[in-house]
Image (tube, rainbow, N blue to C red):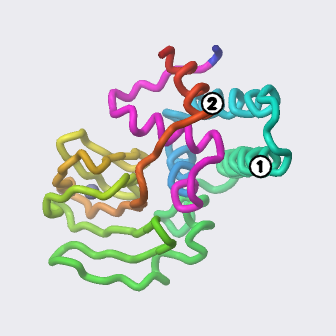
């Protein structure tokens, strides 16, 4: 298999998210998150490209898949590939802060959002509040801690500016942090610069069927 293994030492939850993305099996809010990550960082591009190729071949080889579902999933993969192609060719950021795939998903600039102060030094702007999936931007003052919390389901966070850390690691612009309902964490913004993050909260990722098989094969399980 011709792909470069990511250097990250972070959780397999990020890998599972990338695999689901490659298979076209994530919500629009999560798709925007992963596309923006691939736009900002080259760390996982080869891994995702390899997964996409395997996913496409898997579609061809699986017998008895209804034509309609197969077509939709291939459309999702092609749309994903398009995101990457646009990302590498055009300007790096929109609005000074927003990667183009995220800007496109939001449909507005960061100045056009309505921000709510949740706690002193912590502001939130809701981007999308679909059933079972919430996407928000957080603006956390440098050095400020978010109260410890757990999640129902999965929370994926992409750093857009500054950094934050929790017990799972340190995350900077372009990095994704994934935590689930098992994780009790207390993110703290890095000092020196306010931290801006895009976070998506929704049901846990469950890898089943062809997606799980291709993911496990690439990971050598
Ligand atoms: Zn959290």
The residue located at (42%, 59%) in the rendering is 202
Quadrant of residue 94 within the rendered picture = bottom right
Is the C-beta separation of discs 1 and 2 under 8 Å?
no
> For the residues marked 1 and 2, what is the alpha-carbon distance in whole angstroms?
19 Å
Q: Position of residue 60 (x, y in %)?
A: 82, 30
Q: Earlier in the sequence, mark 1 or mark 2?
A: 2
For residue 132: magenta?
no
**Viewer-side label of 1, 2:** 1
**Image mark for residue 51:** 2
Mark 2 Cα-neighbour bin, 10 Å: few <14, some 14–19, many ≥20: many
Residue under numbered circle 1: 69
Could you tell whether 86 is left or right of 28 in the image? right
Could you tell whether 200 is left or right of 81 in the image? left
Q: Position of residue 146 (x, y in %)?
A: 17, 63
Give ligand 1's quarter of the image: bottom left
Element assignment for label 1: helix
Residue 127 in sight from this viewpoint: yes
For residue 22: magenta?
yes
The residue located at (51%, 72%) in the rendering is 130
Quadrant of residue 27 within the rendered picture = bottom right
Q: Position of residue 190 (x, y in %)?
A: 20, 53
**Image mark for residue 142:** none
Residue 144 in sight from this viewpoint: no
The residue located at (64%, 16%) in the rendering is 2
Give the quadrant of the N terminus. top right
Q: Position of residue 8 (x, y in %)?
A: 38, 29
The residue located at (23%, 39%) in the rendering is 168
Task: In this rendered view, identify the residue nearer to me: 174 or 81.
Answer: 81
Q: Is mark 1 within 8 Å of ligand 1?
A: no
Q: Which residues are magenta?
A: 3-31
């Amino acid at each position: 298999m011709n792909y470069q293994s990511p250097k990250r030492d972070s959780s397999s939850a990020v890998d599972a998210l990338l695999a689901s993305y490659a298979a076209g099996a994530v919500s629009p809010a999560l798709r925007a998150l992963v596309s923006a990550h691939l736009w900002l960082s080259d760390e996982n591009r080869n891994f995702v490209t390899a997964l996409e190729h395997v996913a496409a071949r898997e579609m061809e080889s699986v017998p008895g898949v209804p034509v309609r579902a197969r077509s939709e999933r291939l459309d999702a993969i092609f749309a994903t590939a398009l995101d990457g192609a646009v990302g590498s060719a055009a300007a790096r950021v929109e609005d000074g802060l927003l990667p183009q795939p995220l800007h496109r998903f939001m449909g507005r600039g960061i100045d056009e959002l309505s921000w709510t102060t949740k706690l002193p030094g912590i502001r939130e702007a809701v981007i999308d509040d679909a059933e079972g999936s919430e996407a928000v931007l957080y603006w956390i003052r440098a050095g400020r801690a978010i109260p410890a919390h757990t999640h129902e389901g999965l929370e994926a966070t992409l750093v857009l500016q500054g950094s934050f850390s929790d017990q799972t690691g340190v995350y900077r612009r372009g990095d994704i942090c994934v935590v689930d309902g098992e994780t009790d964490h207390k993110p703290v913004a890095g000092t020196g610069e306010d931290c801006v993050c895009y976070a998506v909260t929704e049901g846990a990722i469950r890898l089943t069927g062809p997606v799980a098989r291709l993911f496990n094969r690439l990971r050598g399980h």
